[in-house]
Image: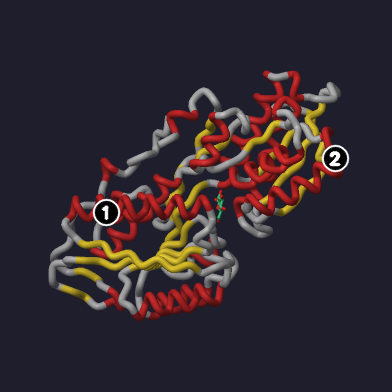
Amino acid sequence: MRGNKRFLTGIIVTGMVSGLLTGCNGEMQTAERKNIKIGVTLYNQYDTYVSQMMAHFNDYAAEKEEETGIAINIEVYNASDSQSTQNDQVKEMLSDGCDVICVNLVDRTEPTTIIDMAEKQNVPVIFFNRELVEEDLERWEQLYYVGAKAFESGIMEGEIAAETFRENPEVDKNGDGIFQYIVLEGEAGHQDAIVRTEYSVSTLIENGVEVEKLGYAIANWNRAQAQTKMTQMLGEYGENIELVLANNDDMALGAIDALKSYGWEKEEWPVVVGIDGTDVGLEAVKNGEMAGTVYNDKEGQAEAMLELAYALSVGGDLSNLPLDNNKYIRLPYEKVGPDDVENYMK
Ligand code: BGC
């Protein structure tokens, strides 16, 4: 059951909109706030997970407006995979007077320009989903991160695969007692890609499953790229592939697209496991195409980001928010299988 939805409802940062407030550009304001402005820049607006998270961010902002009577203006920019475009967008949002800026970094190793610009104007920055290194987040006290613990998702994916192997002897197609696998990886250098790959495999081994890696391919979180890479690997390893560990649901679905166009019956498919629990991913678990997925709590993360952005904009009390080290909000992942998938569907 999705336990995290509305995780903050009981501890919502209320009011605090009159009195001394720090507005954009660090000016102290005494007037009651009638509206706030939040700027958001996305590394790529066509990313399935990020776009579904943003849709919830907007819905939740509308609820928050009703609850508080404060208009929440949200400006969303698409950086289209370019860090320099994203830097320009942040510059524009700062000159537009945004109270807070939410950044889904294109290159998580390149946050310096953004941090320097925001600090100069005293506008807080919430990074999300694409985690910068701790040293960068420590560079100024008004920098935050909202996301999840990547290693948890890898462990859960490995557990789903191990359970499937133990409970369904037929998935060991050649009967050698070894789970032959391939990995479809997200972008090189993305914290979730590196960590999910490592932990999913080590968890299978820790759970007593002997594994053999046949191959891997980087498919940049993308369904079409995953289909192409999977088609190549099917050509190379064919029915020796017993398990596809995908770093996210979109790539798991790309693998399934490849299996379908390869013309195999479903019974001949390898086990496919994903991560995210996007709408399409959940559908594939429900119809038995994927053995399971790991829910990456986009609603929880969107709500946490909105609550934090709101509190920072109105000068609210942050002590009600589940901030670690005054900087991090990380939501837990959850395993999803055919038995409980309906609880996660809209
Ligand atoms: C998600 C991926 C997404 C990526 C974008 C990951 O946390 O699992 O689906 O493509 O973030 O940064």
The picture quadrant where one finds residue 342 is: top left
Q: Which residue is mark 2?
A: 237
Residue at x 50%, y 76% (from the top left corner):
87
Q: Residues within 10 Å of mark 2 (few under 14, many from 20)?
A: few
Residue at x 77%, y 46% (from the top left corner):
231
Of 192 and 217, the residue lying toward us: 217
Which quadrant: the N terminus? Answer: top left
Describe the element under mark 1 as helix, strand or loop.
helix
Query: Which percent across, then down, holds residue 193?
Result: 64, 51
Of 35 and 259, the residue lying toward us: 259
User: Residue 213, relative to residue 302: is it above or below?
Assistant: above
Residue at x 21%, y 62% (from the top left corner):
71
Query: Which percent across, then down, holds residue 298?
Result: 44, 47
Q: Amino acid at mark 1?
A: Ala
- The reply to whether residue 142 is visible in this rendering is no
Q: Amino acid at mark 2?
A: Tyr
In the image, 61: left or right of 47? left
Which quadrant: the C terminus? Answer: top left
Describe the element under mark 2 as helix, strand or loop.
helix
The picture quadrant where one finds residue 252 is: top right
Rounded to the nearest angstrom, the CA distance separating label 2 from label 1 is: 50 Å
In the image, 260: left or right of 74? right
In the image, 126: left or right of 291? left
Residue 62: numbered disc: 1
User: Residue 302, relative to residue 72: is it above or below?
Assistant: above
